[in-house]
Amino acid sequence: MANTQALTTAAKVQFLNGSHAFGAQAANGVRTVTTKDDFFIALFLASATRNASDTVYSTTGELAGTGNYTQGGKILPNATAPTNDGTTAHWTPSGSVTWTALTSSGAFDAAVIYNNTATAKNEVSVHTFSSQSITAADFTLTMPTNNGTTGLLRIA
Amino acid sequence: MQILTQKLIRNGWPQDEPADFIDEALLVKTEGIVDNDNERTVWQEWKLDGKVVKRGAHVELKKNVIAEGIAQMLG
């Protein structure tokens, strides 16, 4: 089993259905969305299997709620609305996320982003990195530069 | 300087009570970097008697996920 970096297939369909609001649109937008959704990020064990076929957030394979980790993860800072860079649309959380004085319940190598405003907590993406075990220390995830080449979520 | 570590019992602590703040001079510190197309990760690890008592990491994500937008031609 392994985690695989991906934009979930379900999220792609939901993008076409207008199911996720990463930013609030102006009144002259395609439709008026005055409140953007809350997106969370949660950490998953290296033994988990999170990938493009995921549909909703689940605690299966997530770090246990111990050692200063709360299942469900943390809200992503979202002060920057989606935009475009040339022909590529992109969105990136506007800041990093830190788990303070964390002791992880095991080695983990993936972070899952999901829509916490949605009733089903629809999963958007899986992001992988080298396996980490944290003991009594901080764990920080820093986001890439928000542009059309490196933005965290892109539609090209 | 004392640093926060995993709470542990070790012979030599006062009354052998569990300790979670330990003099850093007693620990062996190791640092490492993973730098590739996917991430830049910096980690630090402290060991006491060969056991990891503190380990932190900073992961900078580099690789994004992408959906290819396609508008199919009509006809």
Image: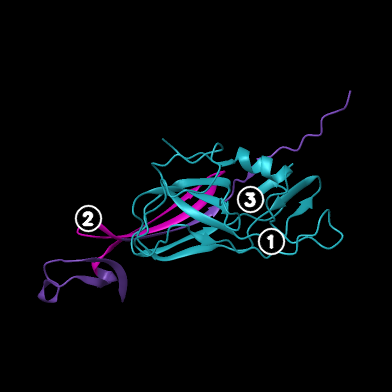
Q: Chain of mark 2?
A: B
Asked whether disc 1 touches disc 2, contact meaning CB atoms under 8 Å apart, the reply is no
Residue B50's mark?
A: 2
Q: Residue at x 84, y 63 (%)?
A: A27
| Amino acid beneath label 3 | Leu
> Chain A's shade in the image?
cyan
Q: Residue at x 81, y 45 (%)?
A: A87
Q: Chain of mark 1?
A: A
The spot of residue B61 in percent (x, y) is 56, 51
Q: Residue furthest right?
A: B75
Q: Nearer the viewer, residue A137 or A68?
A: A68
Q: Nearer the viewer, mark 3 or mark 1?
A: 1
Query: Pointer 1: what residue?
Result: A36
Q: Is residue A89 left or right of residue A42?
A: right
| Amino acid beneath label 1 | Lys
The magenta segment: B26-53
Is residue A137 covered in magenta? no
Query: Pointer 3: what residue?
Result: A152
> SS class of the residue under badge 1?
loop
Q: Chain of mark 3?
A: A
Category of crowding for the residue at label 1, using alpha-carbon neighbours closer than 10 angstroms: few (below 14), some (14–19), many (at least 20): some
> SS class of the residue under badge 3?
loop
User: Which quadrant: the N terminus of chain A?
Assistant: top left
Instruction: Find the distance from the CA under tag 1 to the CA under tag 2.
Output: 49 Å
Q: Nearer the viewer, residue B53 or A155?
A: A155
